[in-house]
Amino acid sequence: MPTAYSILFLLIIVVAIATWIIPAGSYEYIDEVPQAGTYHSIEQQPQGIGAVLQAPFKGFYDAVDVCIFILMVGGFLGIVMKTGAIDAGIGAVIKRLNGREKWLIPILMLLFGLGGTSYGMWEETMAFYPLLIPVFLAAGYDAVVAVSVVLLGAGVGVICSTVNPFATGIASGFAGVSLGEGIVLRILQWIVFEAVAIWFVMSYAAKVKRDPKASVISLAPTEIEATEQEVKPFTKKHKTIMYVFGLTFLIMIYGVIPFDEMGLPLPSLGWWFPELSALFLVSGLVIAVIARLKEQEITETFVAGCADLLGVAFIIGISRGITVIMNEGAITDTVLYWGEQALSGTGSVIFVLLVYLLYLPLSILIPSSSGLATLSVPIIAPLAGFAGVGADLVVTAFQSASGVINLITPTAAVLMGALTIGHIPFDRWIKYIWKLILYLFLLTVAFLAVGVIIG
């Protein structure tokens, strides 16, 4: 199986070829919002070899804030690992659980799921993979279990977003409905989906625990031996470092939650990647001072930590290059127009299911939920009225499709970054997750159909 880099470069080439075949077109925009019924053909803008070569670099420009955040997280984790607090803390956790490590899976997945459904926790999860993979390896599982706990916990939460301002909020605004419309259905969806995902991961984890050869990536002997190393003592200094470590993540989570948009009486900080990058930089320096590291040690360790996640930053930038090619080739609006034409004149249940099916390929081409909502919902939501469907179901169909596709598409930067950190080949991940994706697909169809019937 080719590496993530090769897969993404091949996709850039395929999309560039598509710009020579798919007719170029555009909608009329008002305040960056496309207007339904205004699509028109424009001059073809095929993308050649030069555009293909430049696309990853333009993608980096578009994603520079995320890339810098990833590097700062790497530097922060490098400092923490240098202190030995993580190793000692993992040893203490494993010793205390004493055979009950499996309960980490549902507890952590529920926490990540709450983050996903409430504020769209997705890119922010990149900070947790390097932390949790050693924990689960030490407990006798494989990297797939660790990645699943974070990726599926938060990912299923995003699929069933309730008040997520970056998916539900933006889409609801463009659909002309309040954030609360359809929320009961989405809460029930979250409960069912999260339960199914937890059952799926725990079943796989139990098989790997019983027989390491059952792992889809086959545990290497070096990884198994690493679980048998002597546990280091967890000192007061280590505890202080871990308190600062945990506080950093709590501040990160609080900083990005838009309490004002959720109607909660708490001050919103409105932080995003620049502020979060600064948070991890400062926290890394604070931990280095507590550990009494020398100035040269601090800088060398921080830079080495950044280098460890440089490959993830590359993945994110390259994946953005696909969207760059689509936009510069003027085929994004054409794909949306085809969807608009396909949805016209259908019945209510058929309409909402077609919307869901339409959003599946659209989510591959436009993996950003906020970007996809901005481009497509203003066009598709008005059609719902003609089919007798509430616009809130369009929002649910959109976010359900976008969320589930981001668990399997190589255009999803977070997925490919997580697999890179866990050293999980993409084909092995697909072999592992395809049954869960099928369950989620069928459950979504059922929830959408029920939504139409009770609506």
Image (spheres, rainbow, N blue to C red):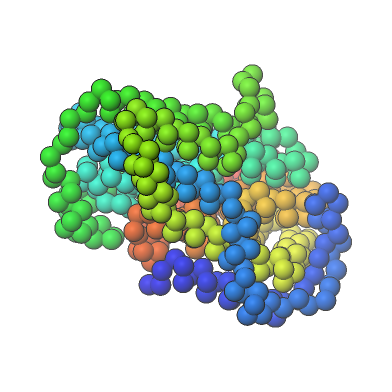
The residue at 28%/28% (across/down) is 238
**Residue 214 percent location from the top left of the image:** 22, 58
Q: Quick one: quadrant of the C terminus?
A: top right
The spot of residue 115 in percent (x, y) is 50, 36
Q: Quadrant of residue 290?
A: top left
Residue at horizontal 62%, vertical 50%?
369
- Whether residue 251 is visible here, answered yes or no, is yes
Q: Residue 240 vs residue 275: left or right?
A: left
Q: Quadrant of residue 296?
A: top left
Viewer-closest of 221 and 174: 221
**Quadrant of the image containing the N terminus:** bottom left
Vertical order, 275 against 37 (above or below): above
- Residue at image position (32%, 35%) is 293
The location of residue 164, given as percent across then percent down, is 61, 38
Q: Is residue 119 left or right of residue 335?
A: left
Q: Name the one closer to the observer, 6 or 68.
A: 68
* Residue toward you, 407 or 11: 11
**Relative vertical location of residue 260 with respect to residue 418 in this rendering, above or below:** above
Q: Is residue 417 above or below residue 3?
A: above
Question: Is residue 207 in sight in this rendering?
Answer: no
Total marks drawn?
0
Where is 451 relative to 252, above or below?
Answer: below
**Outermost residue toward the top in this view:** 265
Q: Whole-percent x and y of residue 18?
A: 65, 77
Q: Residue at x 72, y 68 (%)?
A: 328
Of 204 and 85, nearer the camera is 85
